[in-house]
Image (cartoon, rainbow, N blue to C red):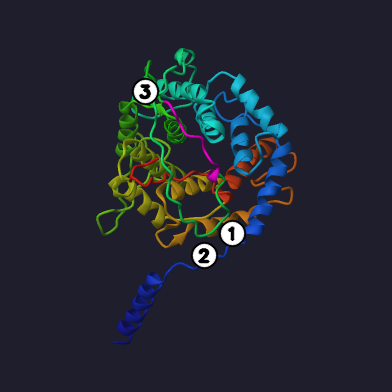
Amino acid sequence: MKLLTVLSLLLAAAFQDAKKPPAPAPQVDESKVQQAIEKGVAYLRTAPSPPAHAGIKNSDELILWTLIHAGIPETDAQVQKLLKGMLAAPLEKTYKVALQAMILEELERVKHQGRIAQCAQFLMDNQCQNGQWGYGSPSEFVKEIETPRTAKPVATETPKEGVRDFGPAPAAERKKPKVVQEILVKKLKEGPAAGDNSNTQYAALGLRACYDSGIMIPEPVVVLAVKWWRESQHPADPKEGVYAGRGWNYKDPAAQPDKKPYLAMTAGGTSCLVIYDYMLGREWKRDTFVKNGMTWLADNFAANTNYYYMYGLERTGILYGTEKFGDHEWYPKGAAVLLKAQKPDGSWGKHKDGDKDEADRNTHDTCFAILFLRRATRALVITESGKTK
């Protein structure tokens, strides 16, 4: 009897622990966040612009994207240098082209609409046959894009004000000029068989920027991308309920059955489906695959120093339209980790003196940390007529 009593008490205690809510999120000190961003920008001013992955010559677009969202004006000498260099360079790699579309849409989507359409052409022509994207290669068809002479008006409305519970005001509150014409682009070449989920999520960010700039993305391109993300979502974790946690990893789970979902790719996959639902006029909060991804992120929530993931978490939270994953307040928890992890020189990352590879990586990690802290992603807002904008 005594043994049964002890076991009962242990089980009851374990049950009570399991029901305990997560610890409350720390309060966000906005002055400390701003100071951290300013120190990070000062570091980026002199940081290397390292090559990143297969044939990617530098990280200029990522640095420029970060400086813009950190509040550095377009007239700044370094911003101008990076911008002019980007516009003078050919469109060659998925990461860089997607970021370029995002930058130009953020700065002046009407003035740069023709170049943004070229970015859309590149991205469509590099879509893989299974719906993914890889690192990409130049498309000869981007030079054929021209801005039409006759403008087709695009309906514009004043979006409803969003609610921000905490954190600095998003840099995405920049006032945007109205798009007054649409440019139709068509996929003109077939891409390779398959790619990877990292390039694929950045391609979605680039296509969203093109779409918001009045570039008409053919529906089959979007539908094929959706098909990939849906079919590559991992089987459900053991869990009661309709919407069990389902995530993604870097590749197709059928090709890598031993690989489990992980945070960065699940954040990426979930946000991509949200973007595509937005582009297709669907309600993403009713999308089963989105719900499954959100459940997985809630069940496996972490705020850590995987800076690539942290920027993905920020994008997912803002694009979906939530300040919580389950009971976890993602911004204050993430901000607390990042503020603690910033180094005296203003950078983030694991750089050790004399270790060049780590110094290069610090550039990327510093960008991702600033973008998280700045809540850089523009929300998918609803206009007063109920349509997405």
| Cβ–Cβ under 8 Å for marks 1 and 3 | no
Determine if the magenta segment contains residue 173: yes
Residue linked to disc 2: 25
Label 3: state its secondary structure: loop
Nearest to N terminus: mark 2 or mark 3: 2
Where residue 108 sits in the image (x, y, percent)? 55, 31
Location of residue 334 by image quarter: bottom right
| Cβ–Cβ under 8 Å for marks 2 and 1 | yes
Residue 134 badge:
none
- Type of amino acid under label 3: Ala
Residue linked to disc 3: 193
From mark 2 to mark 3, how far is it between C-alphas?
44 Å
**Is 151 placed above or below 332 here?**
above
**Is 162 placed above or below 265 here?**
below
From mark 2 to mark 1, how far is it between C-alphas?
9 Å
Residue linked to disc 1: 336
Label 2: state its secondary structure: loop
- Type of amino acid under label 1: Ala
Label 1: state its secondary structure: helix
Nearest to N terminus: mark 1 or mark 3: 3
